[in-house]
Amino acid sequence: MLMKFKKLVLILSILSVAASGAIFWCNKTIENGAKGKLYSQTNLIPFNKVGLLLGTSKFLNNGKINPYYAYRIEAAIELLASSRIKYLIISGDNSRVDYNEPQMMKTDLMLVGIDSSLIFLDYAGFRTFDSMIRLKEIFGQTTVTVISQQFHNERAIFTGQRLGINSIGFNAKDVGTAQGLKTQTREKLARVKVFLDFLFGNKAKFLGPKIEVAEASPFIPFPCVAKGFGKKWFGGVAGI
C-alpha cells in the first residue's frame, strides 16, 4: 500500500511539473510573439483601417462597472479620436437574448459621439480565438489593431499571426493585480488553450455570411471626442 502511495505521489509530481512547464512555455511564447507590436500611445501607433475591440461584460457581479470594459471603451475612443483607425469591429458574446456585449459597447460609444456607421458588430465572438477567425473569414480583414488589455492583446496577436493576420495591439489601461487576479489566472490557462486549438484544428463556433467593412458617407475624424472623454460618462471609473 505504501509503495502504491509513493508511486501515485511521484506520478502526480511529474504531471504537476509538466503542466507548470507547459503553462510557462505557452506564456513566454505568446509574450515573445507580441514584442514590438504593442502600443500604449496614440501618437506612436501606426494607422490601420480597422480596429478590433474585444468584448467583455459591462458589469461585475456586484453591479459596478467592470473596469476592463470601461478601459477598453476609453481606448477605442482614443484611437478613433486620433484617427488611428477608421472603422471599429466589436466582437463579443451574444449567446443569450439578454446578454449582448457588442451592442452594449456600441451603445456606449455612440453616447460619446462615435458615428454608428463606422461600427460593425460581431455577435459570435465567444472567445478571442473565434473573434480572430471571424475577423478574417467574415469581415475579410488581414490587418488589424486589436483593442484590449496588454495580456489579452498578446494572445490575440499570436492567434492572428497563426491565422495570417497582421496584428498590432493598442493597450487599454490594465486592472490592478489584486482586482484582476482571477482574470490573470484564467489568462494563463487560455494561453495553453490557444496551442491546443491549433494543434487539434479547432474552428470558430459559428461563421456565416460575409460582411463588408465600409460606410456610405466619407470618413470624418472626431476632433470633438477628446482623449479621456469617456471617463466623464463612466463616472470616474478610471480611478478604480
Image: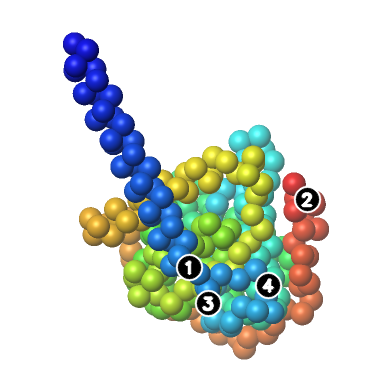
Q: Is residue 74 visible?
A: yes
Give yes or no for contact between labels 3 and 1 (Cβ–Cβ under 8 Å): no
Which residue shows up at 54% across the image and 40% down it? Answer: 182
Q: Which amino acid is tagged 3? A: Val
Q: Is residue 182 left or right of residue 227?
A: left
Of callouts 4 and 2, which one flags the residue occurring earlier in the amino acid sequence? 4
Q: Where is residue 26 in the image (x, y as percent from the top left)?
A: 38, 54
Quarter of the image holding residue 198? bottom left
Of callouts 2 and 1, which one flags the residue occurring earlier in the amino acid sequence? 1
Q: Name the residue under label 3.
A: 50
Q: Can residue 132 be seen in this view?
A: no
Q: Which of marks 3 and 2 is in front?
A: 2
Q: How far, Cα to Cα, is label 2 from label 1?
A: 28 Å
Q: Mark 2 points at which residue?
A: 239
Comparing 151 with 145, the one in front is: 151
Q: Which amino acid is tagged 1? A: Ala
- Depicted 105 relative to depicted 143: above or below: above
Q: Which of marks 2 and 1 is in front?
A: 1
Comparing 88 with 5, the one in front is: 5
Tag of residue 34: 1
